[in-house]
Amino acid sequence: MPSVDHAALLALFDRELREGARPDGPGARVERTGDVVRCVSTAQGWNGVVWSALDEATADAAIAGQIKDYTALGLDFEWKLYGHDRPADLGPRLRAAGFTPDPEETVMVGEIADLDLGATPPQGVRVVPVTDRAGVDLVADVHEKAFGEDSSWLRHQLLARLAADPDTVVAVVAMAGDEPVSAARMELVPGTRFAGLWGGGTVEGWRGRGIYRSLVAHRAHVAAARGYRCLQVDATSQSRPILERIGFVPLTTTTPYVYRP
């Protein structure tokens, strides 16, 4: 993305995806409480704060209010803190209130027209769209092997999205014969210029062969065909170099602060 207007792109990102957040699945809702925008779902969905406009005088009360509300619902939740959020000490304030930070990630953004999307899967690997329960099971299987995490939440959420609102989610799995070796999904946000790339993971033994890059290219072509202009990724230190070679640029950082009552 040559000659990026960083400030303008960051403002667009905040306005469309954070302050203007939309429900991310069946049973989810977006609420604004004071200067905080949050997502509320079931225990199997994603719950958390996506945007805030706080200062030194209002931050602690806002944090306490979110803890009280989510605890009353019996829900764990996440405060998704971005590197440019205010006040500058919001992270320490969250830790003092009982939140635990997960590892920091880099928000990467790419304008689809400027990305290098020529990657294809290696020989013997094919990319298969996921449209049913069998495909979702393959995605969940890859997730567990690639990340070493329970994938029951992913299985539930992806099945619900595909059944209720299939135009807002795209999932793919890379198959080597009958073996699922990589998987990823994309969330399409109606009314915005952004599509989000999520969950890209490859099982050990198949990494370093360009499969991740080919799944990025596949999803980018789908997003462009549906009229989206930009892709957004919360990148780990492993995926950031690959995305930079494709043409993504770092926009800010994001750190999930998790609260468990």
Image (tube, rainbow, N blue to C red):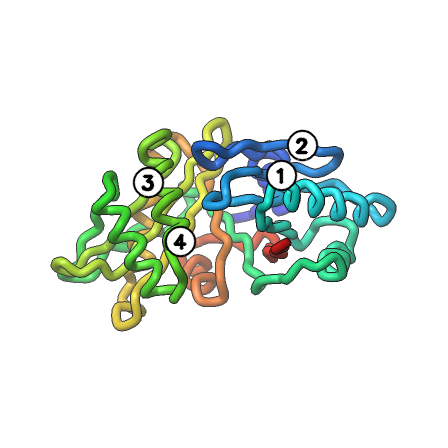
- Circle 3 residues within 10 Å: few <14, some 14–19, many ≥20: some
- Please state which amino acid type lies under the numbered disc 4: Gly
The residue sitting at 22% across, 57% down in the picture is 121
Tell me the SS state at disc 4.
Answer: strand
Tell me the SS state at disc 3.
Answer: helix
What is the number of the mark on residue 38? Answer: 1
Q: Earlier in the sequence, mark 3 or mark 1?
A: 1
Q: Are marks 1 and 4 in contact (CB under 8 Å)?
A: no
Q: Are marks 2 and 1 in contact (CB under 8 Å)?
A: yes
The residue that disc 3 covers is: 159
Q: What whole-number distance in Å separates the C-alpha atoms at marks 2 and 1?
A: 6 Å
- Please state which amino acid type lies under the numbered disc 1: Arg
Q: Earlier in the sequence, mark 3 or mark 4?
A: 3
Q: Earlier in the sequence, mark 1 or mark 4?
A: 1
Question: How far from the left and from the top, in percent, is residue 64?
Answer: 76, 47
Question: How far from the left and from the top, in percent, is residue 112?
Answer: 41, 42
Q: Residue furthest top?
A: 191
Tell me the SS state at disc 1.
Answer: strand
- Circle 1 residues within 10 Å: few <14, some 14–19, many ≥20: many
Q: Nearer the viewer, mark 3 or mark 4?
A: 3
What is the number of the mark on residue 50? Answer: none
Q: Earlier in the sequence, mark 2 or mark 3?
A: 2
Observer-nearest residue: 237 or 65? 65
The residue sitting at 57% across, 38% down in the picture is 40
Q: Nearer the viewer, mark 1 or mark 4?
A: 1
